[in-house]
Image (cartoon, grey):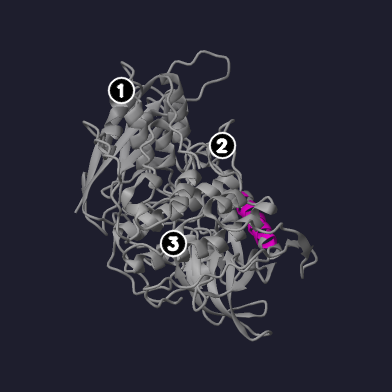
Amino acid sequence: MSDLQEDGDARKRRAGRAPTPAPPARDRATLLRSPPDDGSDLGSNYNQAGVLHAGSRVAEFEIRSLIGQGGFGAVYEAWDTELLRVVAVKEYLPMSLSMRKADGTVVPLSGRTRETFDLGMRSFINEARLLARFDHPSLLKVYRFWQERGTAYMVMPLYRGATLRETLEALHGGPDEAWLLRVMNGVTQALAVMHAGNCYHRDIAPDNIILLEGSGQPVVLDFGAARRVIADKTQDITAILKPDYAPVEQYAKLPDMSQGPWTDVYALAAVMHVALTGQAPPLSVARLLADSYSRLADNEALRKRYSKRLLSAIDYGLGVRPESRPQSMNELRKALGLAEASTVTSRPSNDGGERPDAVGDGTAAPPTGAKSRATGPHPVSIPGTSDRKRKLAAAVAAILFAAAGGAWWWLQQGAGEPGDAAATTTKEPVSPSLASVDPSAAPIATTAVPSSSPPQPPPARPVTPSDSLHALADDTTPGFEVTATPRKAEVTIGKDKLAFEVRSTRGGYAYVFILSTGNELFLLFPNRLDKYNRITPSSPLTLPRASWQMTSGGPAGTNQFAVLVSEHERDFSQAGVQNEGVFPQFPLPVLAALEATRGTGPAPLLGRPICARDSPCKDAYGVATFEVVEK
């Protein structure tokens, strides 16, 4: 809900596609920034857009155009004036943490963001250094990297081709088995090289594999190290998840579920599942509670087209628990009938370090009939007691989803990290749609194959996000009265500002939730920019602060709010909160899973009170709700 609309191409650029004309204004917006409240003055010497303009020079590279920009970086097409070649230049540019001065220097937004900014830049440099050591035709190459103007850069080839997702969409019927195995041959070898260097990708998806124009060579993209480390700094777990492809060990740090080569094995098996069926497997975290996965090897329709070995290998790779799937890429290759990858050794690199030798030939020819483009064991169900389910539900909630964009009100933390995938261009980009805002969640347009097992019956009464929001008031403390009143219950899009007042009969900490017209749920206050949320009985709390205001940006509809005032500060980690950007978000699939398993327990959005260790903790709170209609 802002009058500064986000670039509609940002999400598509992250998928490695060239920009197309912007679609009509959608229900996303950007946060209206104000100067930081630490006394610094950004003034007119700062470029809020941040990106370098065509004709700019960094080192020996002349910027030609912007390929993609996201929350943590920007990627440009550039001309190497010394070696006379076109390259991609990736710049560390976390827009939620930094701004660019008029002289081109990148600086943190304030003293409070400097530590996180510096941490992310160190990780960016470490990522570049790591990639520069690898040498395999299916791994992203880094020519050089350096620091300049307060930030860091890396130079890569400008890859041209189509992502695996786009290629599968063009097939309209699923790939040929031999072609798919050629793609997997290159990808598994590339990942084996990474794993030999104790490096795991943890974000394998069809959008992060590009098939190069002409040769069809697969290249693995998007390593996003800076994004992951910044997430760590904000107490999120160590990877930004794509739910359709993420195994359970990426959702929470569990003592019996560590990450390793088997993590990438699961994601790659999920990619093959999508390629063959047009649909992602059930979410791994939901399968822990009740496994609804249907084995591909038992699907008669699939067995008429694909070998039992391939189908069984995919089933094996999708084992729910880490120990139930192949433990290495070589084990997966063996299950697929591919030759074992060569032993990876190290040899000196041009920068004086060590890098793994390349293994094998990952070339993959284009699939027959495709458009010319810019070119084991059964998965284990875990039965158990109700106590076991409560622990699993907690694991479900300790999650970090990749935000799908979509319908905010006046909120937006910037598009996803363009990553290495943005250093690519493709022809015939797929037209944008609501589903393609998060490409990892969009079904591939191949022919879906019916399962041989009957579908799971729907729940008798699905719990809606609105139900979850209003459930906060189910068990409030008697005498703990909270009221919340908007300044205007109806606002005009593009004109009116949000303002509301909170009062409480008891002192404590205020938490404001919003369920937007786009059906996304956020913690509006406290947030990354405004962490002070104390309220006293004698003083009303007026939000937002006068120092930064929020303007209605649409779409039209009703936005629902809930205000929770708690005697103690609260921890929402078990409610699946995602802290990637300015405003914490509650992914609705996680919330639905928690609602489905909570029974008569407390509302998931309540979180838990934070009390002193080894002291009694009586949870006391009050709740108020209100609505604001946008017209």
Q: Amino acid at mark 1?
A: Glu
Query: Disc 1 and disc 2: Cα gap in Å?
Result: 50 Å
Query: Disc 3 and disc 2: Cα gap in Å?
Result: 27 Å
User: Does the residue at mark 1 contact the one at mark 3 (Cβ under 8 Å)?
Assistant: no
- Camera-side mark, 1 or 3: 3
Pointer 1 residue: 481
Instruction: Using the image as rendered, state which of residue 578 and residue 293 is in the foreground.
Output: 293
Pointer 2 residue: 323
Task: Determine whether the residue tagged by mark 3 lies in a helix, strand or loop.
Answer: helix
| Few, some or many residues within 10 Å of mark 1 (<14, 14–19, 20+) | some
Residue 582 is left or right of residue 470, and the answer is right
- Residue 442 image offset from top left, x and y in percent: 35, 56
Residue 107 is left or right of residue 280, and the answer is right
Q: Amino acid at mark 2?
A: Glu
Instruction: Using the image as rendered, state which of residue 456 and residue 560 is in the foreground.
Output: 456
- Camera-side mark, 3 or 2: 3
Residue drawn where x is 34% and y is 74% of the image: 21
Query: Disc 1 and disc 3: Cα gap in Å?
Result: 64 Å
Q: Is residue 119 magenta?
A: yes
Residue drawn where x is 49% and y is 49% of the image: 313
Q: Of label 3 and label 2, which has the lower sequence position?
A: 3
The answer to whether residue 13 of the structure is visible from this angle is yes
Q: Is residue 480 magenta?
A: no
Q: Of label 1 and label 2, which has the lower sequence position?
A: 2
Task: Determine whether the residue tagged by mark 2 lies in a helix, strand or loop.
Answer: helix
Pointer 3 residue: 177
Q: Please provide the residue range marked out in magenta.
A: 116-130
| Few, some or many residues within 10 Å of mark 2 (<14, 14–19, 20+) | few
In the image as oriented, which residue stretches furthest toward the top? 616
